[in-house]
Image (spheres, rainbow, N blue to C red):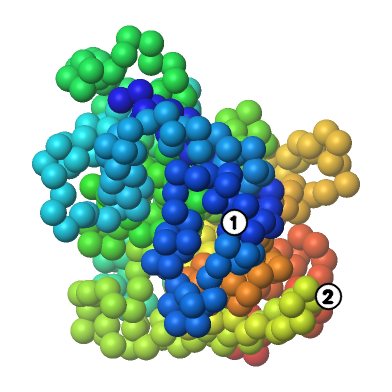
Amino acid sequence: WKSSVQFFQFYAGHNDTDLTKTNITLGELQELVPEIDWLKFLSNYTVGEQRKSLSMKTKVLLRGEKGMYAKYSTLLRDTTTMQNAAFFSWYAYVMNDRQLTRAPFCLVLWHEMFNKLSEHYVAKYLYADVDLGNVETLTESIRAAFIEVLADNKWLAPENKRFLIEKIKNTPAYLGYNKNALDLKVADELAEFISIPDDLSPIEQAMVQTRAKWVRHNYDLGDMVTMGALPLFDVNGQNVDNKYIVLTAGGFAKPSFDPRWPLEFNYGGLGMLIAHEFSHSYDATDDLPSGNVGNDTNEFLERQKCIVDQFGNVTHSNVYLNISVAGDGWNQKEEAAADHQGTLVAFRAYRKQRNRLFGSNPPKLPGLQKYTNDQLFFLAHAQNWCGQLDELKTPAYANIFKKRHPPYSVRINEDMKNLEPFATAFKCPLNSPMNPEKKCRVWRHIKKR
């Protein structure tokens, strides 16, 4: 158990993607961490000429500084082979979600108990103070706005429209985390069963940091999820089969949400994410009750094709690699359409709530008076998707434009181009880059010119 704690603390402290990169030879690495036969290790992950060319003079790129690997060497040296094997077997099983071909019963049992314990400590230290009341209010205002958008729809058959409105009304929204995770009695019983020491502070910290970092590095916002796979609700998403949405406690914090913030920031941040997930409530494969389902499906697909063409025609130039990459509109159509609809629904809900509270004279935000309230909504929405592309200077750069979620800048700019409220808020001239005459509209009526 103590060795597991030590390994956890090591990985928790040395698992960031922004670690220093260090170039050394394989021979230098062998001297740094002699406990591992690195030539044999790398031979298992290379083939052909690459494997044949491996030698102690081969250059390798380390994530992190040499001192980190020296600590790793000490950790390996101070634990037995059995302890190392037990920990790394467990690590592969839990962290990579791979079931071993002949997993020992004790390993499976350990996985189940540790998951419950890690839920408890992550919930206790990260999410216990989350104000779900304000999030519930925000969620229900988004739901109401989405229903209004569907009610205004002019191309759905009446029976299909009623069906989708009822579906949105009755879609459960699970907020935050499993409340049982905060039950200290359950955690204490598990801890006693597996003989955890009385002083829990090291493992508490290690569990929280390791799980939180793993979640952040391995999930995208909006991924499809199931309740069983995510007992702690690690990622936002909508479950297709059971028809519910999951909103993570991690999203109920800055920069997405703070109950003390102005409406513009909360609706532009978390509000848009909620509306995005509600927007996944319908796609072209849904079973609609009306005999007109074929017409409605074709109309939806035609509108979605506009998104496909728009995102597929975006070209990205990388000055570092001297390459240009085209977007993948077909692969990104569902997420891009949900972004588009989600932003419109969130903006509608925001304007309705703002008018209810402040009428025609909403307060200005101190220090940002030069921006209108509507502009702040869109700025908050854009800031929510700010991020660093670590792949910018690597060959993996091209792959990020083929993923289901468009890259950050594309996700914002291409979405905003389709929004009349954005063009109005920033006074973008017609046919300017951010206000093209032709706009994609998923649920709204297309005005005939």
Q: Amino acid at mark 2?
A: Pro
Relative side of 297 to 23, left or right: left
- At mark 2, the secondary structure is loop
Asked if residue 419 shows in the view, the reply is no
224 displayed left or right of 142: left
Residue drawn 80% across and 76% down? 319
Residue at 30% across / 57% down in the picture? 239
State the residue in front, 193 or 368.
193
Question: Residue at image x 36%, y 59%?
Answer: 224
In this figure, which residue is indicated by the disc labeled 2?
429
Q: Give the numbered dot on residue 27.
A: 1
Disc nearest the viewer among 1 and 2: 1
**Above or below for 76 versus 147:** above
The tag earlier along the polypeptide, 1 or 2, is 1
Could you tell me residue 52's position as x and y percent?
49, 77
Picture layout, residue 282 above or below residue 50? above
Q: Provide residue 356's location: percent of width, then percent of height.
A: 59, 40
Give the alpha-carbon distance from disc 1 to disc 2, as whole Å. Answer: 62 Å
Circles 1 and 2, Cβ within 8 Å, touching? The answer is no
Which residue is at 13% across, 44% downward? 104
Q: Amino acid at mark 1?
A: Gly
Asked whether 361 or 426 is in front, the reply is 426
Q: Nearer the viewer, residue 214 or 341?
A: 214
Q: Is residue 206 visible?
A: yes
Secondary structure, mark 1, is helix
Residue 93 circle label: none
Q: Quadrant of the N terminus?
A: top left
Q: Residues within 10 Å of mark 1 (few under 14, many from 20)?
A: some
Q: Position of residue 86 (x, y in %)?
A: 27, 39
